[in-house]
Image (cartoon, rainbow, N blue to C red):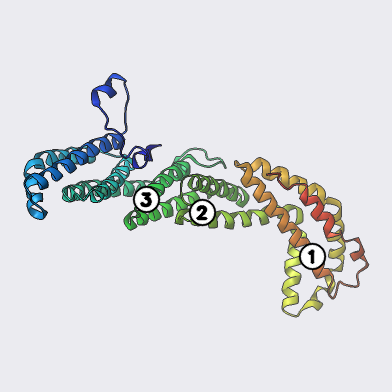
Amino acid sequence: ARNNVLTTELESPIIVPHAAQKNEVRYPFESLFRSQQYALLDNACREYLFVTEFFMVTGPAAQELFNSIMNRTLTMFVKHVELYVQDCYDSIALFLCIHIIHRFQLLMHERSVPALDRYWESLLQHLYPRFEYILKLNIQSIKDCDPQKLGSIDMRPHYITRRYAEFSAAIVSINENFPSDRVAALLASLQGEVENFILKMAAEFQGRKEQLIFLINNYDMMLSVLLERTKEDSKEIESFKELLQARTQEYVEEILAPHFGGMIGFVKECELLQERGQADQMQKEEKKVVMLIRSFNSGWKKAIDDINQDIMQTFTNFKNGTNILQAALMQLIQYYHRFQKVLSQAPFKQLTVRSELLNIHHLMVEVKKYKPNF
Protein backbone atom coordinates (compact mmCIF):
# COMPACT_ATOMS: atom_id res chain seq x y z
CA ALA A 1 0.00 0.00 0.00
CA ARG A 2 1.22 3.47 -0.85
CA ASN A 3 0.50 4.83 2.62
CA ASN A 4 3.20 2.52 4.07
CA VAL A 5 5.55 5.49 3.57
CA LEU A 6 3.75 7.05 6.56
CA THR A 7 4.00 3.99 8.81
CA THR A 8 6.31 0.99 8.39
CA GLU A 9 8.56 2.66 5.79
CA LEU A 10 8.76 6.13 7.36
CA GLU A 11 12.20 5.56 8.91
CA SER A 12 13.36 2.79 6.58
CA PRO A 13 16.90 2.96 5.14
CA ILE A 14 17.20 5.42 2.28
CA ILE A 15 16.91 4.25 -1.33
CA VAL A 16 20.36 3.80 -2.92
CA PRO A 17 19.93 4.91 -6.57
CA HIS A 18 22.53 2.64 -8.27
CA ALA A 19 21.28 -0.42 -6.31
CA ALA A 20 17.66 0.33 -7.27
CA GLN A 21 18.71 0.82 -10.90
CA LYS A 22 20.67 -2.44 -10.94
CA ASN A 23 17.65 -4.35 -9.58
CA GLU A 24 15.33 -2.45 -11.96
CA VAL A 25 13.11 -1.33 -9.08
CA ARG A 26 10.77 1.59 -9.74
CA TYR A 27 9.36 3.77 -6.96
CA PRO A 28 6.42 6.21 -6.78
CA PHE A 29 7.35 9.83 -6.13
CA GLU A 30 6.36 9.76 -2.43
CA SER A 31 8.88 6.93 -1.77
CA LEU A 32 11.69 8.89 -3.42
CA PHE A 33 10.59 12.01 -1.53
CA ARG A 34 10.60 10.16 1.81
CA SER A 35 14.06 8.72 1.15
CA GLN A 36 15.53 12.08 0.15
CA GLN A 37 13.95 14.01 3.01
CA TYR A 38 14.88 11.33 5.56
CA ALA A 39 18.52 11.51 4.43
CA LEU A 40 18.37 15.30 4.79
CA LEU A 41 16.67 15.09 8.20
CA ASP A 42 19.29 12.68 9.54
CA ASN A 43 22.23 14.75 8.29
CA ALA A 44 20.64 18.01 9.43
CA CYS A 45 20.14 16.67 12.97
CA ARG A 46 23.77 15.53 13.20
CA GLU A 47 25.03 18.81 11.73
CA TYR A 48 22.92 20.97 14.05
CA LEU A 49 23.91 19.05 17.19
CA PHE A 50 27.60 19.17 16.17
CA VAL A 51 27.39 22.95 15.54
CA THR A 52 25.75 23.65 18.92
CA GLU A 53 28.30 21.55 20.82
CA PHE A 54 31.47 22.48 18.88
CA PHE A 55 30.82 26.23 18.60
CA MET A 56 28.88 26.35 21.91
CA VAL A 57 25.95 28.29 20.42
CA THR A 58 22.20 28.02 20.91
CA GLY A 59 18.97 29.60 19.59
CA PRO A 60 19.21 32.10 16.69
CA ALA A 61 23.03 31.95 16.61
CA ALA A 62 22.96 28.17 16.16
CA GLN A 63 20.27 28.50 13.45
CA GLU A 64 22.34 31.15 11.60
CA LEU A 65 25.44 28.97 11.65
CA PHE A 66 23.45 25.93 10.50
CA ASN A 67 21.92 27.96 7.63
CA SER A 68 25.33 29.15 6.43
CA ILE A 69 26.42 25.50 6.14
CA MET A 70 23.20 23.90 4.76
CA ASN A 71 21.49 26.73 2.89
CA ARG A 72 22.59 25.72 -0.64
CA THR A 73 21.46 22.13 -0.07
CA LEU A 74 18.09 23.23 1.30
CA THR A 75 17.55 25.65 -1.60
CA MET A 76 18.32 22.87 -4.11
CA PHE A 77 15.85 20.50 -2.38
CA VAL A 78 13.08 23.15 -2.40
CA LYS A 79 13.77 23.88 -6.10
CA HIS A 80 13.56 20.18 -6.92
CA VAL A 81 10.15 19.84 -5.20
CA GLU A 82 8.93 23.05 -6.84
CA LEU A 83 9.82 21.74 -10.34
CA TYR A 84 8.14 18.39 -9.75
CA VAL A 85 4.98 19.95 -8.32
CA GLN A 86 4.46 22.28 -11.30
CA ASP A 87 3.54 19.40 -13.64
CA CYS A 88 2.22 16.89 -11.11
CA TYR A 89 -1.35 15.55 -11.28
CA ASP A 90 -0.90 12.76 -8.73
CA SER A 91 -2.82 14.26 -5.81
CA ILE A 92 -2.32 11.19 -3.61
CA ALA A 93 1.50 11.43 -4.03
CA LEU A 94 1.35 15.12 -3.05
CA PHE A 95 -0.88 14.42 -0.06
CA LEU A 96 1.42 11.61 1.12
CA CYS A 97 4.40 14.01 0.84
CA ILE A 98 2.51 16.58 2.95
CA HIS A 99 1.94 13.94 5.64
CA ILE A 100 5.54 12.71 5.46
CA ILE A 101 6.54 16.30 6.29
CA HIS A 102 4.13 16.42 9.26
CA ARG A 103 5.71 13.25 10.66
CA PHE A 104 9.28 14.43 10.02
CA GLN A 105 8.49 17.73 11.78
CA LEU A 106 7.43 15.72 14.84
CA LEU A 107 10.51 13.51 14.60
CA MET A 108 12.83 16.53 14.58
CA HIS A 109 11.03 18.09 17.55
CA GLU A 110 11.46 14.81 19.43
CA ARG A 111 15.20 15.12 18.73
CA SER A 112 15.04 18.78 19.90
CA VAL A 113 16.29 20.06 16.54
CA PRO A 114 14.33 23.08 15.21
CA ALA A 115 16.81 23.66 12.33
CA LEU A 116 14.49 22.66 9.46
CA ASP A 117 11.24 24.28 10.66
CA ARG A 118 11.28 26.99 7.97
CA TYR A 119 12.38 24.48 5.32
CA TRP A 120 9.39 22.20 6.02
CA GLU A 121 7.01 25.17 5.85
CA SER A 122 8.55 26.19 2.54
CA LEU A 123 7.88 22.70 1.09
CA LEU A 124 4.28 22.75 2.36
CA GLN A 125 3.74 26.11 0.64
CA HIS A 126 4.52 24.40 -2.69
CA LEU A 127 2.71 21.11 -2.05
CA TYR A 128 -0.60 22.27 -0.52
CA PRO A 129 -1.72 24.74 -3.25
CA ARG A 130 -1.00 22.19 -5.99
CA PHE A 131 -2.84 19.43 -4.11
CA GLU A 132 -5.87 21.71 -3.65
CA TYR A 133 -5.71 22.76 -7.30
CA ILE A 134 -5.83 19.11 -8.50
CA LEU A 135 -8.72 18.35 -6.13
CA LYS A 136 -10.64 21.35 -7.49
CA LEU A 137 -10.01 20.07 -11.04
CA ASN A 138 -11.53 16.73 -10.01
CA ILE A 139 -14.56 18.48 -8.51
CA GLN A 140 -15.06 20.57 -11.66
CA SER A 141 -14.63 17.50 -13.87
CA ILE A 142 -17.44 15.64 -12.04
CA LYS A 143 -19.61 18.78 -12.16
CA ASP A 144 -19.18 19.10 -15.93
CA CYS A 145 -19.72 15.40 -16.64
CA ASP A 146 -22.72 14.72 -18.90
CA PRO A 147 -24.14 11.18 -18.36
CA GLN A 148 -25.49 11.13 -21.93
CA LYS A 149 -21.92 11.28 -23.28
CA LEU A 150 -20.81 8.22 -21.29
CA GLY A 151 -22.45 5.65 -23.55
CA SER A 152 -24.78 2.92 -22.29
CA ILE A 153 -25.33 2.70 -18.53
CA ASP A 154 -26.42 -0.44 -16.70
CA MET A 155 -27.60 -0.82 -13.11
CA ARG A 156 -24.27 -2.01 -11.73
CA PRO A 157 -21.89 0.34 -9.85
CA HIS A 158 -20.45 2.85 -12.31
CA TYR A 159 -16.67 3.06 -12.85
CA ILE A 160 -16.67 6.81 -11.99
CA THR A 161 -18.23 6.20 -8.57
CA ARG A 162 -15.74 3.38 -7.94
CA ARG A 163 -12.84 5.70 -8.79
CA TYR A 164 -14.30 8.35 -6.49
CA ALA A 165 -14.70 5.81 -3.65
CA GLU A 166 -11.09 4.57 -4.00
CA PHE A 167 -9.76 8.13 -4.17
CA SER A 168 -11.88 9.45 -1.30
CA ALA A 169 -11.00 6.46 0.91
CA ALA A 170 -7.28 7.05 0.25
CA ILE A 171 -7.45 10.76 1.13
CA VAL A 172 -9.70 10.24 4.19
CA SER A 173 -7.46 7.48 5.60
CA ILE A 174 -4.32 9.63 5.16
CA ASN A 175 -6.08 12.67 6.65
CA GLU A 176 -7.19 10.82 9.82
CA ASN A 177 -3.97 11.27 11.83
CA PHE A 178 -3.34 14.94 11.04
CA PRO A 179 -6.85 16.20 10.16
CA SER A 180 -7.05 19.26 7.93
CA ASP A 181 -10.23 21.32 7.73
CA ARG A 182 -9.19 22.58 4.27
CA VAL A 183 -8.99 19.01 2.97
CA ALA A 184 -12.24 17.99 4.70
CA ALA A 185 -14.04 20.94 3.03
CA LEU A 186 -12.71 19.95 -0.43
CA LEU A 187 -13.69 16.31 0.12
CA ALA A 188 -17.20 17.39 1.17
CA SER A 189 -17.46 19.45 -2.03
CA LEU A 190 -16.26 16.49 -4.13
CA GLN A 191 -18.74 14.18 -2.40
CA GLY A 192 -21.59 16.62 -3.07
CA GLU A 193 -20.76 16.68 -6.79
CA VAL A 194 -20.50 12.87 -6.92
CA GLU A 195 -23.92 12.55 -5.25
CA ASN A 196 -25.40 14.95 -7.83
CA PHE A 197 -23.68 13.00 -10.63
CA ILE A 198 -25.17 9.68 -9.41
CA LEU A 199 -28.65 11.26 -9.37
CA LYS A 200 -28.12 12.55 -12.92
CA MET A 201 -27.02 9.07 -14.00
CA ALA A 202 -30.03 7.45 -12.30
CA ALA A 203 -32.34 9.84 -14.16
CA GLU A 204 -31.21 8.16 -17.41
CA PHE A 205 -33.31 5.11 -16.45
CA GLN A 206 -37.03 5.25 -17.26
CA GLY A 207 -38.56 3.39 -14.30
CA ARG A 208 -38.26 4.39 -10.65
CA LYS A 209 -37.39 0.81 -9.67
CA GLU A 210 -34.37 0.76 -12.05
CA GLN A 211 -33.29 4.19 -10.76
CA LEU A 212 -33.37 2.91 -7.17
CA ILE A 213 -31.42 -0.26 -8.04
CA PHE A 214 -28.71 1.87 -9.70
CA LEU A 215 -28.55 4.24 -6.70
CA ILE A 216 -28.45 1.41 -4.14
CA ASN A 217 -25.72 -0.49 -6.02
CA ASN A 218 -23.57 2.64 -6.24
CA TYR A 219 -24.11 3.81 -2.64
CA ASP A 220 -23.41 0.29 -1.37
CA MET A 221 -20.18 -0.04 -3.38
CA MET A 222 -18.88 3.35 -2.17
CA LEU A 223 -19.79 2.49 1.41
CA SER A 224 -17.99 -0.89 1.18
CA VAL A 225 -14.77 0.73 -0.12
CA LEU A 226 -14.84 3.45 2.56
CA LEU A 227 -15.58 0.98 5.39
CA GLU A 228 -12.64 -1.15 4.28
CA ARG A 229 -10.13 1.70 4.37
CA THR A 230 -11.28 4.32 6.89
CA LYS A 231 -12.66 4.71 10.40
CA GLU A 232 -16.35 3.88 10.71
CA ASP A 233 -17.30 7.29 12.12
CA SER A 234 -16.07 9.34 9.14
CA LYS A 235 -18.51 11.92 7.70
CA GLU A 236 -18.43 10.21 4.30
CA ILE A 237 -19.51 6.86 5.76
CA GLU A 238 -22.36 8.41 7.77
CA SER A 239 -23.59 10.26 4.69
CA PHE A 240 -23.61 7.19 2.40
CA LYS A 241 -25.24 5.04 5.12
CA GLU A 242 -28.13 7.53 5.30
CA LEU A 243 -28.49 7.69 1.51
CA LEU A 244 -28.40 3.88 1.21
CA GLN A 245 -30.99 3.46 3.97
CA ALA A 246 -33.39 6.00 2.45
CA ARG A 247 -33.19 4.51 -1.07
CA THR A 248 -33.46 0.94 0.30
CA GLN A 249 -36.66 1.87 2.16
CA GLU A 250 -38.10 3.35 -1.02
CA TYR A 251 -37.08 0.25 -3.02
CA VAL A 252 -38.76 -2.04 -0.46
CA GLU A 253 -42.07 -0.21 -1.03
CA GLU A 254 -41.51 -0.42 -4.79
CA ILE A 255 -40.92 -4.20 -4.81
CA LEU A 256 -43.84 -5.00 -2.47
CA ALA A 257 -46.31 -2.93 -4.51
CA PRO A 258 -46.88 -5.31 -7.50
CA HIS A 259 -47.69 -8.23 -5.17
CA PHE A 260 -49.30 -6.57 -2.13
CA GLY A 261 -50.10 -3.03 -3.36
CA GLY A 262 -53.89 -3.47 -2.91
CA MET A 263 -53.53 -4.46 0.75
CA ILE A 264 -50.91 -1.77 1.47
CA GLY A 265 -53.07 0.98 -0.10
CA PHE A 266 -56.15 -0.26 1.79
CA VAL A 267 -54.25 -0.27 5.14
CA LYS A 268 -52.95 3.28 4.65
CA GLU A 269 -56.37 4.60 3.58
CA CYS A 270 -58.21 2.98 6.53
CA GLU A 271 -55.62 4.15 9.08
CA LEU A 272 -56.03 7.70 7.79
CA LEU A 273 -59.83 7.55 8.08
CA GLN A 274 -59.61 6.08 11.61
CA GLU A 275 -57.20 8.84 12.58
CA ARG A 276 -59.70 11.45 11.37
CA GLY A 277 -62.60 9.71 13.16
CA GLN A 278 -64.30 8.85 9.84
CA ALA A 279 -64.27 5.03 10.24
CA ASP A 280 -67.94 4.82 9.17
CA GLN A 281 -66.86 5.74 5.61
CA MET A 282 -65.14 2.33 5.37
CA GLN A 283 -68.43 0.34 5.44
CA LYS A 284 -68.64 0.29 1.66
CA GLU A 285 -65.27 -1.53 1.51
CA GLU A 286 -66.60 -4.94 2.71
CA LYS A 287 -66.42 -6.57 -0.74
CA LYS A 288 -62.87 -5.25 -1.15
CA VAL A 289 -61.87 -6.84 2.21
CA VAL A 290 -63.11 -10.27 1.06
CA MET A 291 -61.16 -9.93 -2.20
CA LEU A 292 -57.95 -8.76 -0.43
CA ILE A 293 -57.98 -11.61 2.13
CA ARG A 294 -58.59 -14.32 -0.49
CA SER A 295 -56.11 -12.83 -2.93
CA PHE A 296 -53.43 -12.71 -0.19
CA ASN A 297 -54.14 -16.29 0.91
CA SER A 298 -53.83 -17.67 -2.59
CA GLY A 299 -50.63 -15.90 -3.63
CA TRP A 300 -48.48 -14.83 -0.67
CA LYS A 301 -46.00 -17.75 -0.78
CA LYS A 302 -45.33 -17.40 -4.51
CA ALA A 303 -45.07 -13.60 -4.13
CA ILE A 304 -42.37 -13.97 -1.43
CA ASP A 305 -40.44 -16.39 -3.64
CA ASP A 306 -40.70 -14.02 -6.63
CA ILE A 307 -39.47 -11.10 -4.49
CA ASN A 308 -36.53 -13.23 -3.27
CA GLN A 309 -35.51 -14.16 -6.84
CA ASP A 310 -35.93 -10.62 -8.10
CA ILE A 311 -33.73 -9.12 -5.34
CA MET A 312 -31.03 -11.78 -5.54
CA GLN A 313 -30.65 -11.32 -9.30
CA THR A 314 -30.68 -7.54 -9.09
CA PHE A 315 -27.99 -6.49 -6.59
CA THR A 316 -24.28 -6.89 -7.25
CA ASN A 317 -23.38 -7.33 -3.57
CA PHE A 318 -24.91 -10.56 -2.20
CA LYS A 319 -24.82 -9.34 1.41
CA ASN A 320 -26.56 -6.10 0.48
CA GLY A 321 -29.19 -8.05 -1.51
CA THR A 322 -29.83 -10.27 1.51
CA ASN A 323 -30.25 -7.22 3.77
CA ILE A 324 -32.74 -5.68 1.32
CA LEU A 325 -34.69 -8.95 1.13
CA GLN A 326 -34.89 -9.07 4.95
CA ALA A 327 -36.05 -5.42 5.03
CA ALA A 328 -38.76 -6.19 2.42
CA LEU A 329 -40.03 -9.28 4.27
CA MET A 330 -40.08 -7.46 7.63
CA GLN A 331 -42.03 -4.63 6.03
CA LEU A 332 -44.49 -7.15 4.61
CA ILE A 333 -45.05 -8.66 8.10
CA GLN A 334 -45.67 -5.16 9.49
CA TYR A 335 -48.18 -4.34 6.74
CA TYR A 336 -50.01 -7.64 7.31
CA HIS A 337 -50.09 -6.99 11.06
CA ARG A 338 -51.57 -3.52 10.38
CA PHE A 339 -54.09 -5.10 7.97
CA GLN A 340 -55.27 -7.49 10.71
CA LYS A 341 -55.48 -4.61 13.20
CA VAL A 342 -57.67 -2.55 10.82
CA LEU A 343 -60.00 -5.56 10.37
CA SER A 344 -60.27 -6.09 14.15
CA GLN A 345 -61.98 -2.69 14.51
CA ALA A 346 -65.34 -1.30 13.41
CA PRO A 347 -66.86 -1.57 10.84
CA PHE A 348 -65.03 -4.80 9.87
CA LYS A 349 -64.82 -6.69 13.18
CA GLN A 350 -68.15 -8.55 12.62
CA LEU A 351 -67.20 -9.81 9.15
CA THR A 352 -67.25 -13.63 8.87
CA VAL A 353 -64.43 -13.52 6.28
CA ARG A 354 -62.05 -12.58 9.11
CA SER A 355 -61.92 -16.26 10.02
CA GLU A 356 -60.09 -16.81 6.71
CA LEU A 357 -57.25 -14.46 7.72
CA LEU A 358 -53.87 -16.17 7.65
CA ASN A 359 -52.29 -16.57 11.08
CA ILE A 360 -49.39 -14.09 11.11
CA HIS A 361 -47.12 -16.77 12.64
CA HIS A 362 -47.43 -18.83 9.42
CA LEU A 363 -46.16 -15.77 7.55
CA MET A 364 -43.27 -15.33 10.01
CA VAL A 365 -42.27 -19.01 9.75
CA GLU A 366 -42.13 -18.74 5.94
CA VAL A 367 -40.10 -15.50 6.14
CA LYS A 368 -37.57 -17.21 8.45
CA LYS A 369 -36.73 -19.65 5.64
CA TYR A 370 -35.17 -16.75 3.74
CA LYS A 371 -32.97 -15.66 6.66
CA PRO A 372 -29.23 -15.79 5.80
CA ASN A 373 -26.93 -18.28 7.55
CA PHE A 374 -24.09 -15.77 7.99
Q: Provide the residue designation for mark 1.
A: 339
- Which of disc 1 and disc 2 is earlier in sequence? 2
Q: Provide the residue designation for mark 3.
A: 175
- Which of disc 3 and disc 2 is earlier in sequence? 3
Mark 2 vs mark 3: give the one in front: 3
**Residue density around tag 1, few if under 14, some if 14–19, many if 20 or more, within 10 Å:** many
- The amino acid pointed to by label 3 is Asn
Q: Residue at x 65, y 50 (%)?
A: 324
Instruction: Kindly report the distance in space between the C-alpha atoms of the residues bearing marks 1 and 3.
Output: 51 Å
- Up-down relation of residue 32 to residue 25 (above or below): below
Instruction: Kindly report the distance in space between the C-alpha atoms of the residues bearing marks 2 and 1.
Output: 33 Å
- Asked whether, in this view, residue 360 is left or right of residue 251, the answer is right
Where residue 281 sits: x, y (%)? 80, 76
Where residue 196 sits: x, y (%)? 46, 53
Mark 1 vs mark 3: give the one in front: 3
> Which numbered dot is residue 128?
none
Indicate the secondary structure of the residue bearing disc 1: helix
Quadrant into which the C terminus falls: top right
Q: Residue at x 27, y 47 (%)?
A: 107
